[in-house]
Amino acid sequence: MEQKKHKILIVDDEPGMCKLIKEIVQDIGYQARTFTSPKKALQQIRTESFEIAIFDMKMPEMGGLELLEKALLVRPGLDVIMITAYGSIEGAVEAIKLGAFNYITKPFQQEEIKLAIGKIMERKN
């Protein structure tokens, strides 16, 4: 019997970044859904269950922190990893305060994403 694959939501306005993270996620055996539109991703969060979400901080349509807040209102137990090319201590602190599980700066190593996902899954089990 095939075990149900955990689903991870990826939201980044850069299609290339979505593709890269999706490959990392699938590489460690998880399903991935990608969105370049935070608004469309939020609609998806309302109808589909995800174990983890990975949000970019800076997106034109809606910032990652706003998406984080809205996503957690819809799915309070959602574990979110924030990624950003504009890393700052303030940004990290704000993201964690709002409920993000982790904060990763670009360019990141694939291992950072894998490790963050691993920590969340370990905690869930």
Image (cartoon, helix red, strand yellow):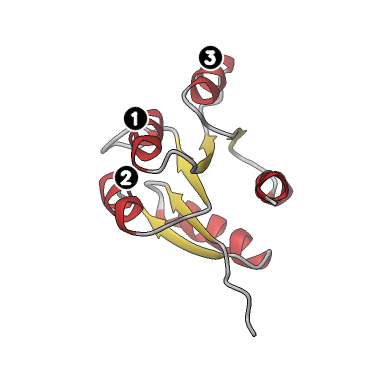
Residue 51's spot in the image, x, y percent?
53, 53
The local secondary structure at tag 2 comes to helix
Q: Which residue corresponds to the image point at 29% horizontal and 35% vertical from the top-left?
A: 62
Report whether 29 appears left or right of 77.
Answer: right
56 is higher (above) or lower (below) than 6? above
Frontmost of labels 1 and 3 is 1
Mark before the other along the chain sequence, 2 or 3:
2
Whole-angstrom CA distance, mark 2 to mark 1, is 9 Å
Residue situated in front as seen by the camera: 26 or 20: 26
Q: Residues within 10 Å of mark 2 (few under 14, many from 20)?
A: many
Tell me: residue 100, above or below residue 75: above
Of residues 32 and 86, the one nearer the viewer is 32
Q: Residue 80: x percent and y percent?
A: 52, 40
Q: Which residue is mark 3?
A: 90
From the top left corner, tell me how far across and down residue 125 is, in percent. Answer: 70, 52
Residue 112 visible within the image:
no
Expressed as whole percent of the image width and height from the top left, the position of residue 37 reads 30, 49
Left or right of 35 on screen, residue 94 = right
Give the residue number, with chain letter if any, for mark 1. 66
The residue drawn where x is 49% and y is 52% is: 17
CB of mark 2 within 8 Å of CB of mark 1? yes
- Mark 3 Cα-neighbour bin, 10 Å: few <14, some 14–19, many ≥20: few
C-alpha distance separating marks 2 and 3: 22 Å
Q: Amino acid at mark 3?
A: Glu
The amino acid sitting under disc 2 is Pro
- State whether residue 29 appears in this view: yes
Circles 1 and 3 in contact, beta carbons < 8 Å: no
Which disc is residue 38 wearing? 2
Q: Residue furthest bottom?
A: 1
Q: Residue furthest top?
A: 90
Disc nearer the start of the sequence (1/3): 1
Residue 48, compared with residue 4, is above or below; it is above
